[in-house]
Image: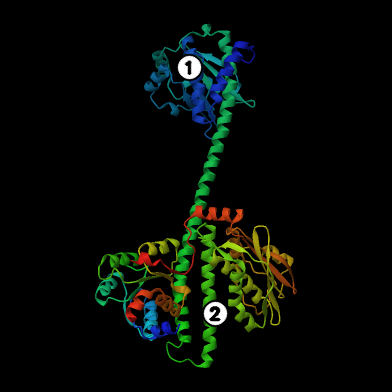
Amino acid sequence: MQESCWFDIVWIMKVLIIEDDQFYAKIYRKKFEVEGHQVESCPDGEEGFETAKKFLPDVILLDIMMPKMDGFEVLDKLRAEPHTAQIPVVMMTNLSTEEDKAKAQQKGATLYIVKSDLTPSQVTTAIKAALPESKSAKAA
Amino acid sequence: MKLNSTPRSQKTFELLWKLQKVILDTLDFNDVVQRIVDSTVIELGYLKLGYEIVVLCLVNQRKQQLDRIAISHTDAAKKAISELKIPFPEIVIPLHTKNNLLIKAIETREAYTTTDWMEILHPAFTTEEARNLQRNLGIKTSLVVPIISSDQAIGTIIFSMSKPKEQISADEFDLLNGFSDVVSLAVQNATIHTKLQATSDKLQLANEKLHQLDSLKDEFVSIASHELRTPMGAIKSLVSMILEGDYGPISDSLREPLQDINVSVDRLVNLVNNMLNISRIEQGRMKFSFMDFDALALVEQVINSLEPLAKARGISLTFGQVETDSIQVDQDKLVQILDNLVGNALKFTDAGGAITVVMSKDVDKISVHVSDTGAGISEADQRTLFGKFKQISSQQKGKPAGSGLGLYISRELARKMGGDLWIEQSEPNKGSTFTVSFPISGTALAKQVKAAIDAESNPNSTITITQLPAESAK
């Protein structure tokens, strides 16, 4: 217990938020920054994918419903690109259908989150809990 | 000539029986009328007796005319059709026409013979056209028989033959007379059937429309809930972060209204989620993932989580007598149901009251009884309590209003899992006991429910945050 608390404090993640709703982008950026992480955000999938290749984040928060390129398309591109293929992706939505959840799982997303059901604190806690491998890699 | 007076021989009876079987074998109107005109020439072989063309006409009351309905599949008939100046179905005779033998047969309800087709084609054809056609086809005599139904002529049948009237035998007259009765019956049957068919088609269409509307409603609820969730989620996120101090320290005077906003938003989120739940339940899209749990452990977990709330309200929340066993449930759904039952008890019980949870074991079920010393529910309210959007009318002032969806959803969830939910007893001002039951693991009931759900779909439960398997991320 003691150890994991210590990791939480010192572990600085690079977080990429791909979200067209600027309210949510702002909210999550604030939450991650308050917790000391480094955040980039993009308002659409195309820009998000390009940024992911350069920024190489530790985790990507990816909205599903977006104009131009939706979250699933972005996820496919991220998985097909060698540099981003291994980055954990958290799918975020407010349209929680079983189909979307199954699709996210099948395409290799790490987490599937319904935004309105969780507070940002709960989201960051869930994300940190879901990334044990990268966490221990960083700490080592 | 009055055909009705002709006595019927045994042979005629047999032939009519044969015709009746052929004609009444089908109920489709078009089939029936075609069989009527074909059966005498084909089944009875009257073609050899010089019967060349058989035509069925029926009265069209709406248009006040006599319609040509069917014509036999004979060579002469085919030739006639090819020589007609207008299509066969367009040969119509107004009912008030004078000098037409068909109309006369209908008016007098008697049979006639003619050697002149002018008498059966006027006024659709000129005298010359009618006679030319008759001559080309070699028709010498036409016998016109009315079709009588309940003392009314509903049409006529025309037998046109290549022999003179004198050569029509008594047996033939006898049969053709009896045949008109068969035709009458067949036409009536087919008409009724066709009407029924049309009604059934209309119902089918209405049913399809309802189904479309239902799926539209589902789609609407889904989209509306998404649209509602987006701003709700933003408010909820912002308020929680303000309360956590992410935007700087907040004063004590602001803390309470912010917490109230938080509670209200949570209630709103719940309401929208409940609406979505109902839509899913009703569409059969609610997913269940069953596992075996110790009943007491699960119930204890819910009670413990609600303990602080009960304490804050000054209500005691304790266990009474407990019997437990392993139950087969979807954990999230069970928690949702018990949260709802205990939550309701907390909502309608005043400070100083008590909530007691008792568990009992039946043959294949574990029941959880939640009793409170609260407001209670009148008998009238008990009857409507499980309806959608139902709230008891005698709700106390100042008590927070719910959506009225909770009990409905809880009962549906309990039933889908093989259990049930009901009011054990309740009396105004004395309190209520609600009971929910769940199947014991491994029982026939549990197996049956699991098989039914597995058959329905893949066993994924609806939860808002899901840790996906690590291997799929690689």
Specify the quadrant of the image occupied by residue B375: bottom right
Front-most of B352 and A132? Answer: A132
Q: Chain of mark 2?
A: B
Q: Chain of mark 1?
A: B
In this rendering, position of residue B240 left or right of residue B363? left
Q: How is the image coloured?
A: rainbow
Front-most of A20 and B437? Answer: B437
Residue at image x 34%, y 71%?
A88
Q: Position of residue B221 (x, y in %)?
A: 49, 64
In this rendering, position of residue B313 left or right of residue B86? right
What number is the disc on residue B164? none
Mark 1: few, some, or many residues within 10 Å (few <14, many ≥20)? some
Front-most of B379 and A99? Answer: A99
Residue at image x 48%, y 73%?
A117
Q: Position of residue B474 (x, y in %)?
A: 33, 66
What number is the disc on residue B263? 2
Residue B85 against residue B371 in the figure, above or below = above
What amino acid is found at the position of numbered circle 1 in the picture? Ile
What amino acid is found at the position of numbered circle 2 in the picture? Val
Look at the numbered disc 1 and give the secondary structure of its residue. Answer: helix
Residue A18 against residue B451 in the figure, above or below = below
Marks 2, 1: nearer the viewer? 2
What number is the disc on residue B42? 1
Q: CA separation, marks 2 and 1?
A: 85 Å
Q: Position of residue B68 (x, y in %)?
A: 48, 26
Image mark count:
2
Residue B328 visible in the shown view: yes
Look at the numbered disc 2 and give the secondary structure of its residue. Answer: helix
Residue B122 against residue B242 in the figure, above or below = above
